[in-house]
Image: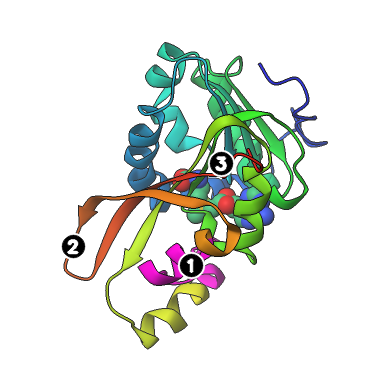
């Protein structure tokens, strides 16, 4: 178990205001249905007893859908997020799923996190919405135990679309959900190259005509891990 993951935030255990609950509810309707399968594919690859840093755990609903796997593999997860509303829902969800002994939601930004060491760091739909993906990759690579891996799952768009590039960030104003920017493969690969972290694998989990959902696995150089 990690012991230096820090506290869960000042709002732990308090009543959750209606607006916060609505945001969490909407998030679960729009995001978690899709990302639950992404989580499952990543968790299946982790060794038993793995210490995992989930960067941007959100409401944790996707992880709750994989509660069987979390328990069977005895995973030890620190779930980091900067959104107190999502984390409040996350704590309730983890308790309801009997995962409090496995998952510790923690308020904070990836750039400030100094926990670990971890066997894996996972960005599910969170890497390319960060202001500095290269810095985030470098930072989590430095928190990994030797042999640790960085995982990322997210949507890729096949062709450039100026309309989508304009519209996607605006969706936050309507839904309050950060969807980030439209991501293309060359940019994604470039972020890992610039971070000095070797992208070992980029597997397509599902594909449509215009976009695909992919799973990336990256291996930091020995000095970083
Ligand atoms: C699209 S959601 C994905 C949530 C979850 N991983 C999933 O796949 O269902 C992205 C999450 O990243 C969080 N996030 C954004 N910036 C962050 C940062 N600097 N550090 C940690 N989490 C961050 C957001 O608050 C949000 O909950």
Horizontal relation, residue 8 to residue 40: left or right: right
Q: Residues under labels 1 and 3: Cα distance?
A: 24 Å
Q: Residue at x 49, y 63 (%)?
A: 179
- Under circle 2, the secondary element is loop
Mark 3: few, some, or many residues within 10 Å (few <14, many ≥20)?
many
Instruction: Check disc 3 and report the residue beneath it.
Output: 57
Horizontal relation, residue 75 to residue 67: left or right: right
The answer to which of 205 and 33 lies nearer the viewer is: 205
Q: Residue at x 41, y 29 (%)?
A: 43
Provide the residue span drawn in magenta: 172-191
Q: Is residue 63 above or below residue 211?
A: above
Q: Is residue 176 magenta?
A: yes
Instruction: Check disc 2 and report the residue beneath it.
Output: 208
Q: Is residue 82 visible?
A: no
The answer to which of 191 and 182 lies nearer the viewer is: 191
Q: Is residue 45 above or below residue 58?
A: above
Q: Nearer the viewer, mark 1 or mark 2?
A: 1
């Amino acid at each position: 178990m990690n012991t230096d993951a820090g506290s869960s935030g000042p709002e732990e255990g308090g009543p959750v205001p209606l607006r916060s609950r609505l945001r969490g509810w909407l998030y679960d309707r729009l995001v978690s249905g899709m990302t639950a399968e992404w989580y499952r594919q990543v968790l299946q690859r982790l060794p038993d007893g793995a210490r995992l840093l989930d960067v941007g755990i959100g409401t944790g609903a996707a992880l709750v859908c994989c509660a069987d796997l979390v328990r069977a593999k005895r995973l030890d997860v620190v779930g980091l997020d900067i959104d107190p509303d999502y984390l409040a829902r996350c704590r309730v969800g983890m308790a309801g799923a009997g995962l409090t002994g496995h998952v510790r939601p923690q308020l904070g930004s990836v750039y400030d996190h100094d926990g670990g060491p971890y066997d894996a760091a996972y960005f599910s739909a969170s890497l390319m919405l960060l202001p500095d993906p290269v810095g985030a990759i470098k930072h989590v690579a430095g928190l990994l135990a030797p042999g640790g891996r960085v995982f990322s799952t997210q949507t890729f768009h096949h062709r450039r679309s100026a309309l989508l590039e304009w519209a996607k960030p605006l969706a936050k104003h309507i839904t309050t959900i950060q969807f980030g920017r439209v991501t293309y493969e060359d940019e994604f690969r470039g972020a890992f190259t610039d971070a000095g972290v070797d992208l070992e694998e980029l597997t397509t989990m599902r594909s449509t005509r215009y976009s695909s959902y992919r799973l990336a696995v990256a291996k930091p150089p020995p000095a970083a891990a």
